[in-house]
Amino acid sequence: MPIPAAIPLNADLHCHSVVSDGTLSPEDLAARASANGVQLWALTDHDETGGLRRAGAAAQAQGMAYLTGVEISVTFADTTVHIVGLGFDPDNARLAQGLAATRDGRGERAKEMGAQLARAGIGGAYEGALQFVGNPALISRTHFARFLVESGRCQDTGEVFRKYLTEGRPGYVPHRWARLGDAVRWITEAEGVAVIAHPARYKFSANEEFALFSEFKAHGGQAVEVVTGSHSAAEYLSYAALAQEFGLAASRGSDFHSPAESHTDLGRLPPLPDALTPVWALLADRIRHPTRHLAPDRA
């Protein structure tokens, strides 16, 4: 049964599993999403689609509608920006090649991060981070953060990033990711929709943000995350206005990584602001609906 675009929907179209830097399996994420009332779900691991078949099967078992997803790292204005892809063909060869190329270099970057932390007096960080990695090809700053919390260096992952893993700190190692235009084309050529993820996180100037939205739209991008776990209520409204200004659809996703780390749980976001086109309206023919439907609650 198609999902009418006009009906408010508990859609969560941004979260991560152990296949990238989350702590739950695709199956456990699907169960948690379903328990929290999610009606339309997507798993969006970083630069990796290896968990999508499991996620799709788990969504089917939970009776949830499902979209394929991924979150691609790009470099724009010397800043790492994330582009979510939704509803694409996961077997598209060009997308697979692009994601593989984007993943290249993470291992060497991680070793250099470990070396820099060792020079700052924190030995064994690279080996420690590996203990938290489900997919060694996707070792990231988050895995180092979990090690530093587990080893007692910091109280939480936020403190780790502030002290060690952001620009100018001893464990920060820059990396150039995919180009914005390439990432958008990989998604759209695979018949998906490209979405700017959590735009408030990038701390761009007004001119830089305008350039990001303009270039994204010119390359074929079609949506922006308006309601997401790291946005404030004021930012929901700000990015709703930008979505309208640029003619973009609106997406909604918690960016959930872990029960112990994430501020917003799966399915616990407010609805999209009124007068926006939800991204799922662009993807009606790409949504995978469960074959079994739960009986309506007649209580």
Image (cartoon, rainbow, N blue to C red):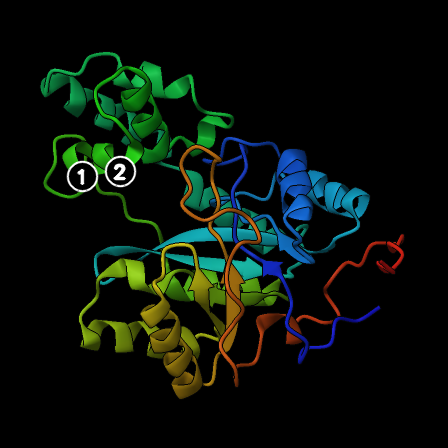
Q: Secondary structure at mark 1?
A: helix
**Which quarter of the figure is the N terminus placed in?**
bottom right
Q: Residue at x 65, y 61 (%)?
A: 87
Q: In percent of the image, x 77 and y 42: which residue is there?
A: 57
When the figure is inspected, residue 258 is found, relative to residue 273, above or below; the finding is: above
118 over 204 or under it: above or below: above
Mark 1, residue position: 162
Q: Residue at x 37, y 80 (%)?
A: 242
Q: Check residue 158 in the rendering and tell me which mark sits there, or answer none.
A: 2
For residue 211, side relative to residue 277 (left or right)? left
- The quadrant of the picture occupied by the C terminus is bottom right
Q: Is residue 40 above or below residue 113?
A: below
Residue 19 lies, in percent from the top left, at 54, 34
Q: Quadrant of residue 76?
A: bottom left
Total marks shown come to 2
Measured Cα–Cα span from mark 2 to mark 1: 6 Å
Q: Residue at x 50, y 64 (%)?
A: 270
Amino acid bearing label 1 = Arg
Name the foreground residue: 251 vs 189: 251
